[in-house]
């Protein structure tokens, strides 16, 4: 009896595509929120200093 890998590969590809799209949309949302709503440079949202400042502000 052979095991059919097609459903496994298909499901794995769907999960990977979903995770890729989710990360792209999350990054775009961060950039829009920081750049447009926060009046900052959208590229600066990925800087370590930005997140340190945000976390210090929360604490």
Image (tube, rainbow, N blue to C red):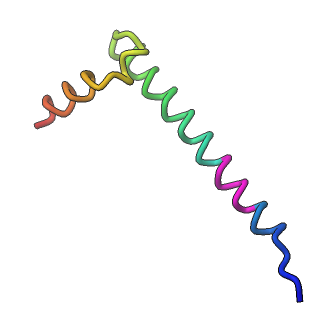
Q: Is residue 43 above or below residue 53?
A: above
Residue 18 lies, with reference to residue 55, above or below; the image says: below
User: What's the residue at 75%, 68% (across, down)?
Assistant: 8
Residue 45 position in % (x across, y down) = 37, 21
Q: Is residue 9 left or right of residue 41?
A: right
Specify the farthest residue to the right: 1
Q: Which region of the structure is painted magenta?
A: 11-17
| For residue 17, above or below residue 37 | below
Location of the N terminus by quadrant is bottom right
User: Between residues 27 and 12, which one lies in front from this camera angle?
Assistant: 12
Residue 12, picture quadrant:
bottom right
Q: List the single residue furthest toward the front.
A: 2
Q: Is residue 54 left or right of residue 27?
A: left
Asked if residue 13 lies in the magenta stretch, the reply is yes
Q: Main secondary structure of the magenta part?
A: helix
Could you say which quadrant of the image residue 53 lies in? top left
The image shows residue 59 at horizontal and vertical percentages of 10, 37
């Amino acid at each position: 009896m052979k095991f059919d890998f097609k459903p496994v590969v298909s499901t794995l590809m769907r999960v990977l595509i979903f995770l890729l799209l989710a990360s792209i949309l999350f990054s775009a949302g961060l950039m829009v929120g920081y750049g447009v709503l926060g009046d900052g440079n959208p590229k600066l949202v990925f800087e370590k200093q930005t997140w340190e400042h945000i976390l210090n502000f929360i604490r």
